[in-house]
Image (cartoon, coloured by chain):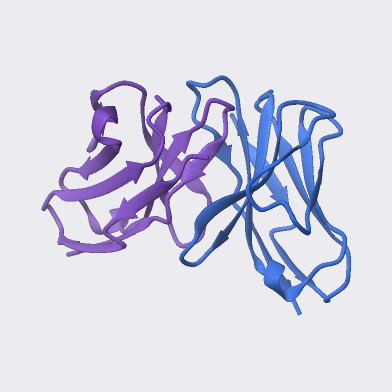
Chain colours: A blue, B purple
Amino acid sequence: EAAVTQSPRNKVAVTGGKVTLSCNQTNNHNNMYWYRQDTGHGLRLIHYSYGAGSTEKGDIPDGYKASRPSQENFSLILELATPSQTSVYFCASGGNNNQAPLFGEGTRLSVL
Amino acid sequence: QQKVQQSPESLTVSEGAMASLNCTFSDGTSNNFRWYRQHSAKGLEVLVSIFSDGEKEEGRFTAHLNRANLHVSLHIREPQPSDSAVYLCAAMSNYNVLYFGSGTKLTVEP
């Protein structure tokens, strides 16, 4: 069964600390995405990838890095976390243009 | 960059009455639109995908696309309380990136 798994599901971090959010997909999809969701903003694209070794900046990449070491895994890295990065983060994977991207359950991040 | 706007922000309907949600987009070059549903900040569930002008039905959910008017809508037939959720419209760019609206919160009252 197609799946996108995010870890951790919940995270509390301190300001200035490093945070890594992980995403694994078993769908053999080339494309993967990281979004954040905040009240009033819907889902906003942070980074995306077209395959292993590739990362692209989305609409709000500042303060975030991404890593795609393999087809299955895509990480979002906050090197110096700030309270403004408190949000719910969603990972998704997608195949060809006619396949609807599949989403993980989300990671709730609080930066104190 | 595709900009997607949804209306209304919130909608309350009675169980069994038709619910209609709207979405307008800024760039007419996309031909790939999705409606997703999200229960209580959980993951997104795709409801309908539509790629050409006209209508696409998936069970009780029907999407209408009119690219000339930069408009796509979702109609939910016989909504139930379990359909209460946030509904998100998304347009896919030529680079296989989904752009989302800010959502419509639907409440279905028994």
Q: Residue at x 56, y 59 (%)?
A: A37
Q: Residue at x 39, y 41 (%)?
A: B26
Quarter of the image for residue B10 reads bottom left
Q: Residue at x 86, y 33 (%)?
A: A69
Q: Position of residue B47 (x, y in %)?
A: 37, 38
Instruction: Examine the rendered structure and indicate whether residue B6 appears above or below residue A29.
Output: below
Instruction: Examine the rendered structure and indicate whether residue A17 appears above or below residue B80.
Output: below
Q: Residue at x 53, y 50 (%)?
A: B43
Quarter of the image for residue A62 reads bottom right
Q: Is residue A23 left or right of residue B67?
A: right
Using the rendered image of the protein, determine whether residue B58 is visible from the camera's viewpoint: no
Q: Is residue B34 left or right of residue A96?
A: left
Picture quarter with the N terminus of chain A:
top right
Q: Position of residue A111 (x, y in %)?
A: 75, 74
Q: Nearer the viewer, residue A28 or A49?
A: A49
Picture quarter with the C terminus of chain A:
bottom right
Q: Is residue B95 left or right of residue B7?
A: right
Q: Position of residue A54 (x, y in %)?
A: 80, 30
